[in-house]
Amino acid sequence: MISEDTYSLKVASKEVTTSKGLEQLISYSVYENKKFIHSSSYGGRFFSCRQDKPKIEAINSEKGQVGWMIVGYGICGNTVSNRIELVVPVKSMRGGKTLYRSETIIAKEVPKLVSKKNGADVWFYEQNWGNGGTASSIFVPRKLVIRKDDHSSTIRKGDVFQDIGVLESLKSNEWLRPNFISLFVAGLEDANPHLMNYALENYYKTEDKEWYEVYVQNGSKEELFRLIRKVEVLRDLYEEVKGSVTWNLELNKSSKSDAATSTGS
């Protein structure tokens, strides 16, 4: 870890029976200089629906390691997705105590970590079925931004449109590569008209209109532009009232120093 202190992670798993059947209960503990530290919220355990042992990957900034990614399984059936736990310790975060932040996500594949000056960007895909079934389902790109300094840390939703070249260059399976409807739905999820417009201008295919209508009522270009206008109004409204509502529409941007050093895959 980047510090004069030493941090370690211990992970254990055991078979348990839940309402979903036989699962793995994965528990983890974080230590600073061999001393146990607590979560800033409710970290420390999660369930994995397959019997595979959890895998652990380092989360690295350009300066060195800032945390860990624990990989289990969150959807097991006709389709399979990973359950991912992101863990980042922070020294003297609250009342002089060292704690750790954690975030759980469901990802179609193990996320791609892109190192930044003060943390890392986490790129991943969520499966979305819309009003259809597995055959017409899509894989929506998502992004989390981890930023860390000596006394603070954040794990926040990132702007998929920013550094979209990273997403487009990822060496993924063919069915995970960006397409119009996956990018457009990502924009809808985040109330991000810039991403929606980019998808429409660069990826729209008239012959796929019927597929698009599994996710929107009308898949014509004209109607999709109209949806973008509505989202622009929503985004403007949010900026006016965000101090009074609980909408999760914040999109964390990279800092200028991050942007200057950002790299592709």
Image (cartoon, rainbow, N blue to C red):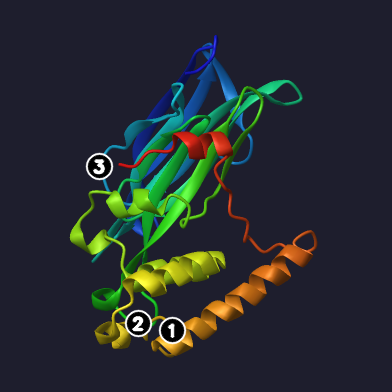
Secondary element at tag 3: loop
Secondary element at tag 2: helix
C-alpha separation, residue under disc 2 versus residue under disc 3: 36 Å
Q: Quadrant of residue 256?
A: top right
Q: Which of the two discs, 2 and 3, sits closer to the camera?
A: 2
Q: Residue at x 54, y 65 (%)?
A: 192
Q: Which residue is mark 3?
A: 52
Q: Residue at x 40, y 54 (%)?
A: 164
Q: Quadrant of residue 112?
A: top left
Which three-letter amino acid code belongs to the residue tagged 2?
Tyr
Contact, mark 2 vs mark 1 (Cβ under 8 Å): yes
Q: Which residue is mark 1?
A: 216
Which three-letter amino acid code belongs to the residue tagged 1?
Val
Q: Which residue is mark 2?
A: 212
User: Could you say where residue 134 lies in the image, as x and y percent from the top left?
Assistant: 27, 74
| N-term-proximal mark, 2 vs 3 | 3
User: Could you say where residue 161 lies in the image, as x and y percent from the top left?
Assistant: 46, 57
